[in-house]
Image (spheres, grey):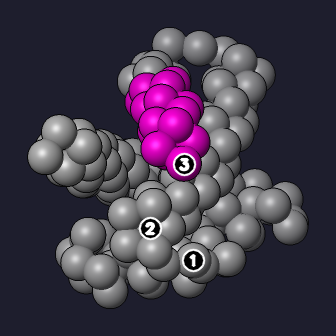
Amino acid sequence: MEGKLNRKITQLKASVCNLEGSLSIELGLFPELVKDSIESGQIQKFEISSELLWKTLKIFLYEISGIDEKSPKSVIKSFFNSGYCSYEEYEMLMTMINDRNSLSHVYNSEMMQSIRTRLSDFLIVMKKCLETVENAAAEKNAIDKYEEYR
């Protein structure tokens, strides 16, 4: 199982880095059609990253704490209840899941623009969760190796 968590962490790290790169693009430098395509790409990268995040947290909770949740919101709630994130981060993660769900069901230009304004905040909380998961996983790996040599 340790390999599965490490693979998910690697995938999430690459996805978050990709999202961060797309958000650093200065949109004002491009014609409207190109700008619209870049914005759509940012939204798609957000959807992929948010999906990878909750799935990584799901595997993390199971491997580290034995918690087996099925849905994105229950995973986020357990991540918070286990003390891995603050209440403010929990709220932001729930908003992120709600926004991702909204994008998956209905296309609305105003809604998309509204969500785009939160992408930088979502990126911050994704990076914080990634750091938390990496640190806890590394600590567990170190403890496991120590136990092996005892």
Specify start and end residues of the magenta stretch as a single range: 1-20
Q: Nearer the viewer, mark 3 or mark 1?
A: 3
Looking at the image, the residue that sits furthest to the right is 106
Could you say which is closer to the camera, residue 105 or residue 6? 6
* Residue 94 percent location from the top left of the image: 49, 76
Q: Give the amino acid at mark 3.
A: Met
Picture quarter containing residue 110?
A: bottom right
Q: Are marks 2 and 3 in contact (CB under 8 Å)?
A: no
Q: Which residue is mark 1?
A: 68
At 44% across and 67% down in the image, what residue appears? 61
Q: Which residue is mark 2?
A: 61
Earlier-in-chain disc, 1 versus 2: 2
Main SS, magenta residues: helix
Judge left or right: residue 36 versus residue 42.
Answer: right
Could you say which is closer to the camera, residue 134 or residue 93? 134
Q: Are marks 1 and 2 in contact (CB under 8 Å)?
A: yes
